[in-house]
């Protein structure tokens, strides 16, 4: 039997040679000095040879263990050479059939029917949260524990909704791989109930008393903030849309306003928000039919006229302070509310709750038990880009612009209700007024 010293000292000669160990194992030394372990055996009446691997990567001890494994396969009636080839092919296929590979292939197949912003969002979420954790694993070797560990890291940073969307996307990737012929357990389906639930209901501090809302608006009117920030707050309050939609609103999205005739009433003014900007369910975000149309009250148009001199026709409606092509800071309006003493009582996103709560309550008082009450509740949901209770996605497709006349009436009622005692929009563009002590 060979010793470690003999193996270590084996060097090149004029021709290839072997150093025998025992049980068919030997060290093959080529004339170039390359050393490899080989096992000679007989199977099916024929002499065969199995290359176990190079030395010193595989030690003498490990080579003997591999030889013993091969002998065990022979005793069980299996060809160790064929077993080795199958294992090698399996490793090669596993290296190719990774989660990342199938995720990219699935994503590429979806891109033609997705909006660019959504396609980018999906891939960025994979790259940021899943590829580094499970991307390199063969997809048929990923189990619930591996996937759940990756998703809980997303939950740990507070992105509960993101973790649940990632699980949905991962489930589609596993199904895609199965359709391509790579069987897998699709662990994404089993970890659904192990994830933290998305908190429903009102999560944002919001004023629901009209007198307090008027007080907040007056404070903003007279605050020491830029005209764009104060006008953005006014537009946010009037439209009750998501703050991100207002920040990224662009002038081409505004229709029905003749900017050359600012004194002409704009009875047909509206804001058409593209579908890719809407924060909707995944299936809806992929459909251009789900753009959101917002009828603009006369007060909202006044805000647009007041802010127009501060922006560029090719940039956002509410630009930041550095240039006219960068949107207003995400925190600008929120910080303004905090500075004016409304911290913990109202946030920019809270205008949606304020509008829904107050207008629904007002309608209940005006039309108790009437059919009009049910219709107006549906209209309010449509104005907020919510899917009304009992309305399916297909019905929403055809009703997204429905009840436009009533939506305009409610928008005007809301504006009149909250702007009582407020400064005009044009005065906000002139700079902050002196605060009146109360």
Image (cartoon, rainbow, N blue to C red):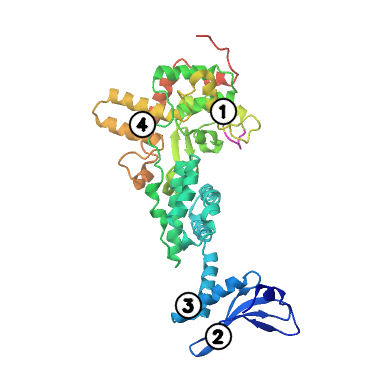
Instruction: Name the N-terminal-most of marks 3 and 2.
Output: 2
Instruction: Name the N-terminal-most of marks 3 and 1.
Output: 3
Q: Which label sits in the foreground, 3 or 4?
A: 3
**Placement of 17 over or under 178, stated as above or below:** below
The magenta stretch is 312-316
For this view, does 343 lie left or right of residue 390?
right
At label 4, counting other C-alpha atoms closer than 10 Å, the crowd grade (few under 14, some 14-19, many 20 or more) is some
Instruction: Name the N-terminal-most of marks 4 and 2.
Output: 2
What residue is at 60 percent from the left and 32 percent from the top? 319
Please tell me whether mark 1 sits on a helix, a strand or a loop: helix
Q: Quadrant of residue 385?
A: top left
**Placement of 376 over or under 160, stated as above or below:** above
Please tell me whether mark 2 sits on a helix, a strand or a loop: strand
**What numbered label is drawn on residue 332?**
1
Q: Which residue is mark 2?
A: 48
Characterize the magenta stretch by its predominant secondary structure: loop
Q: Position of residue 24 (x, y in %)?
A: 57, 83
Q: Is-magenta flag for residue 328?
A: no
At label 1, counting other C-alpha atoms closer than 10 Å, the crowd grade (few under 14, some 14-19, many 20 or more) is some
**What numbered label is drawn on residue 406?**
4
């Amino acid at each position: 039997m060979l010793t470690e010293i003999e193996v270590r000292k084996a060097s090149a000669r004029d021709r290839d040679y072997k150093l025998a160990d025992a049980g068919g194992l030997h060290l093959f030394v080529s004339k170039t000095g390359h050393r490899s372990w080989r096992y000679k055996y007989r199977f099916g009446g024929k002499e065969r040879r199995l290359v176990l691997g190079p030395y010193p990567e595989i030690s003498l001890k490990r080579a003997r263990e591999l030889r013993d494994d091969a002998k065990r396969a022979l005793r069980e009636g299996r060809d160790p050479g064929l077993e080795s080839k199958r294992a090698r092919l399996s490793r090669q296929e596993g290296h190719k059939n990774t989660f990342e590979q199938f995720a990219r292939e699935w994503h590429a197949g979806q891109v033609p029917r997705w909006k660019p912003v959504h396609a980018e969002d999906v891939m960025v979420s994979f790259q940021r949260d899943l590829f580094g954790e499970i991307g390199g694993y063969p997809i048929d070797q990923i189990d619930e524990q591996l996937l759940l560990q990756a998703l809980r890291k997303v939950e740990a940073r507070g992105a509960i909704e993101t973790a649940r969307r990632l699980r949905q996307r991962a489930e589609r990737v596993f199904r895609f791989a199965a359709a391509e012929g790579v069987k897998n357990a699709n662990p994404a389906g089993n970890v659904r109930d192990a994830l933290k639930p998305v908190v429903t209901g009102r999560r944002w501090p919001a004023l629901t008393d009209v007198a307090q809302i008027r007080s907040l608006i007056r404070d903003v009117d007279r605050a020491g903030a830029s005209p764009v920030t104060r006008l953005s707050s006014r537009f946010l309050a009037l439209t009750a849309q998501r703050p991100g939609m207002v920040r990224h609103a662009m002038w081409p999205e505004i229709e029905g306003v003749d900017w050359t005739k600012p004194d002409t009433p704009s009875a047909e003014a509206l804001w058409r928000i593209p579908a890719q900007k809407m924060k909707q369910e995944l299936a809806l975000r992929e459909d251009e039919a789900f753009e959101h149309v917002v009828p603009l009250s006369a007060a909202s148009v006044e805000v647009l006229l007041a802010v127009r001199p501060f922006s560029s026709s090719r940039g956002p409606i509410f630009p930041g302070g550095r240039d006219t092509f960068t949107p207003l800071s995400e925190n600008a309006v929120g910080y303004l509310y905090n500075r004016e003493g409304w911290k913990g009582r109202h946030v920019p996103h809270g205008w949606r709750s304020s509008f829904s709560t107050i207008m629904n309550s007002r309608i209940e008082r005006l039309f108790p038990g009437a059919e009009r009450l049910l219709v107006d509740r549906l209209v309010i949901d449509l104005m907020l880009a919510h899917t009304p209770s009992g309305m399916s996605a297909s019905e929403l497709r055809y009703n997204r612009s429905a009840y436009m006349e009533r939506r305009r009436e409610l928008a005007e009622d809301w504006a009149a209700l909250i702007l009582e005692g407020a400064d005009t929009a044009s005065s906000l563009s002139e700079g902050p007024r002196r605060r009146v002590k109360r």
